[in-house]
Image: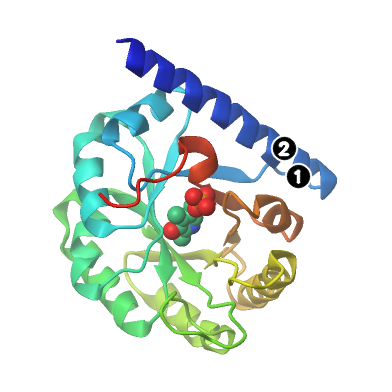
């Protein structure tokens, strides 16, 4: 299948470039840990995810519940770790906990309750580690609604709720840089939020930040996980 071979070669070249950027950014920040790459496969077909797995990708991110649930169900043989990174309605929690190891978008108490209930009722989670939960932080100083995320002032209470919930593990924080602001500044605020959370919950060490456009700034500010879509898979189709 020449098309498939061409796509594999394209993904391999893109991955190598992105991995090189991650390593260079970590070196520039004098970090001795290597930030982890989560490849965001939303809007791209399950076949691309299969090719990526063959190229050594082990962690993938999705932000749309229906698409993610369908894709993960087709790819159970690959042993991937699925990260759910999009806004999540509480009534969809039960679908997501079937396949996700990590949810990056925990931003309100009602979602914590829904995830806890879903994990406890999902037979497929028996014997699996607790669901890793990241608190999504709204870094917009004008707190524009719609993009999701808890305000920094809400993180203490939300973190305590996750830490006390059965079947959930408080793993850290996640954010998207606000539009129209230097991402470096925004990610510094995220780093402060992360540090504060670690004061109460020392194991909550994940900092999920950085996309195709701003992974360098995120790594400079201490991101442990970057979420890269476009620069690995190419542009997303406008509609699907
Ligand atoms: C789509 C998406 C990404 C990846 O963005 P790119 O700019 O395509 O790299 C990262 N994080 C979230 C929350 C996303 O929805």
Q: Position of residue 38 (x, y in %)?
A: 50, 45
Question: Residue at the top extreme?
Answer: 1
What residue do we see at 69% from left, 75% from top? 189
SS class, disc 2:
helix
Mark 2 to mark 1 CA distance (whole Å) = 5 Å
What residue do we see at 48% from left, 27% from top? 11
Circle 2 residue: 23
Quarter of the view holding residue 41: top left
Label 2 within 8 A of ligand 1 by Cβ? no
Front residue of this view, candidates 156 and 86? 86
Label at residue 26: 1
Which colouring convention does the figure follow? rainbow
Front residue of this view, candidates 62 and 7? 7
Q: Position of residue 27 (x, y in %)?
A: 81, 41
Q: Position of residue 123 (x, y in %)?
A: 15, 53
Question: Residue at the front extreme?
Answer: 238
Label at residue 114: none
SS class, disc 1:
helix
Quarter of the view holding residue 148: bottom left
């Amino acid at each position: 299948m020449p098309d498939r071979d061409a796509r594999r070669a394209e993904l391999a070249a893109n991955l190598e470039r992105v991995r090189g950027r991650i390593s260079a950014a970590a070196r520039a920040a004098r970090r001795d840990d290597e930030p982890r790459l989560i490849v965001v496969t939303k809007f791209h077909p399950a076949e691309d995810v299969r090719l990526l797995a063959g190229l050594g990708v082990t962690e993938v991110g999705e932000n749309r519940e229906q698409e993610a649930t369908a894709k993960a169900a087709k790819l159970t043989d690959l042993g991937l770790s699925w990260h759910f990174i999009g806004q999540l309605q509480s009534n969809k929690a039960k679908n997501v906990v079937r396949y996700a190891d990590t949810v990056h978008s925990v931003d309100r108490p009602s979602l914590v309750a829904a995830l806890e209930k879903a994990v406890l009722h999902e037979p497929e989670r028996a014997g699996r580690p607790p669901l890793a939960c990241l608190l999504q932080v709204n870094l917009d100083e004008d707190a524009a609604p719609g993009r999701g995320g808890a305000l920094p002032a809400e993180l203490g209470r939300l973190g305590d709720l996750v830490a006390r919930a059965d079947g959930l593990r408080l793993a850290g924080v996640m954010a998207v840089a606000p539009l129209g602001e230097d991402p470096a500044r925004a990610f510094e605020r995220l780093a402060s939020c992360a540090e504060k959370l670690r004061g109460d919950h020392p194991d909550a060490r994940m900092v999920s930040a950085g996309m195709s456009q701003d992974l360098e700034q995120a790594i400079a500010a201490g991101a442990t996980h970057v979420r890269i879509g476009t620069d690995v898979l190419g542009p997303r189709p406008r509609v699907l």
